[in-house]
Image (spheres, rainbow, N blue to C red):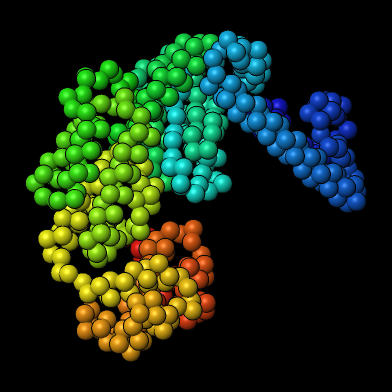
Amino acid sequence: MMNRIHTLMPDTIFIFMSGYSDKEYLKAAIRLQAVNYVEKPLDIQEVEDTVRSAIERRHALEQARNAESLTESISAAHLALCLTMPYSSSRESVEDLSRRYCARYGSVDLFHAAFTVLLQTDEKEDLSPEFFPHLQDVLHDFARQLHLHVIAAEKKPNLFVFHLFRKASFSENTVKTITSFLSGHIAVKNWYISAGQIVNGIQKLYTSYSSAAIRLQSSFFYNKGTVLLKDPGIPAPAREDPGKISDALLAALKNPDRDTLQQLQERLYRSIYENPVLLRGNIQNMYYRLLDAVFTQRRIRQLPGSGISSGFDNALDALNHCFSFPELHDMLKSALAKYLDDVENYVPVNSSVYLIKTYIRQHYNNPMLSTKEISEYVSLSASYACTVFKNETGQTLNQYLTEFRLERAKELLADPRNNIADIAASVGYNDSNYFGKAFKKYTGQSPSDYRESRNQT
């Protein structure tokens, strides 16, 4: 029985207690490295010392196992990174590390069939320390059901590599099963997964990694949360030059016509989507120019609001919010639609009111901002500035300032990384308690409750 227990649970610590002086039992105790062989009559002190010794040995064994496990994890991660480099340049390290890995499982070669999976998350995403270890654990447990081994590493910030392999062959259905499972356990919103081709032998695993990397390069043109299992292929020549369409859009913004702008933005989308060899950076620069031009035209025409329904202050903020090309184009569509609506519904604003709003927009974060300071900026007396502003807008100047600050606070609360006290200071409140009262009076919720309800939504 002891032999069976030792086979099933090799870390078990044995204590033999017997009423007989049996040499065979004693030999078995020695063979199984028992802590002690206690005979009758029992000595309570001896039993206590024996149990205490068994506990100490067990703790020591656990520490040794943990240290061994950590060493194996580091070695596996090192191997995973080495396999993202050409085999010719990392051959010595790959052979040494793979030999040690296979030896742990009593095999000469576990890499008969293999493939690579890449996971890319948004570089702006604040990943928890447990994000990657948790993914490794759940994928390891699932892959084991398919008799697959997994080694993984973080190639660079927000890019994670997984190599999966086994001694027997498998089909593309296995790749789909693995990527589908992985996609269901990613605890962030913005991500892409790509899988490389199935290869035979560890020497060819870099080929699988390379094909996964090529597929991932085209991810920008897909919606977030896409799994890429095929090569993008050779695109047909673009029927139109995106640069020329972009220039036409810039020119059309100055004398906006709804049909013209809608046609141009649709042509721009098609020309880029049909030409995925365009570099992501070039596309982002193009859309930055367009979004910035929309913001500029809004300022020239003195249009109210931020220019985008999401409430961004400038083109760079809007651009940084986009993870994919579809998101980026939707942002431009939103900006153009709001620009056209506001141009059509525009009612000329009193120049003094426009200057007051501009000054507040630029200085709202100053807690000492006063009616006196604002009125001096527009060269009016404080009382007259307040009267003009109330007559034109229906709000008092202080009401407008408070509303502007609290609307900005609502935007900042959408990001859970922003501390509420820091938000209060950034929108012009020295006292976070007073900020909380003002915010609740304006929205009906405390800042923390508003953040929680928004995140749930």
* Position above or below: 180 against 448: above
* Position above or below: 388 against 76: below
Left or right of residue 32, residue 180 in this image: left
Q: Position of residue 150 (x, y in %)?
A: 52, 27
Which image quadrant for residue 13?
A: top right
Residue 231 visible (yes or no): yes
The residue located at (42%, 46%) in the rendering is: 188
The residue located at (25%, 47%) in the rendering is: 332
Q: Position of residue 158 (x, y in %)?
A: 49, 38
The residue located at (21%, 20%) in the rendering is: 237
The residue located at (88%, 47%) in the rendering is: 49
The residue most toward the left is 259
Quadrant housing the N terminus: top right
Left or right of residue 28, residue 429 in this image: left
Which image quadrant for residue 28?
A: top right
Quadrant housing the C terminus: bottom left
Residue 268 or residue 145, whichever sits in front = 268
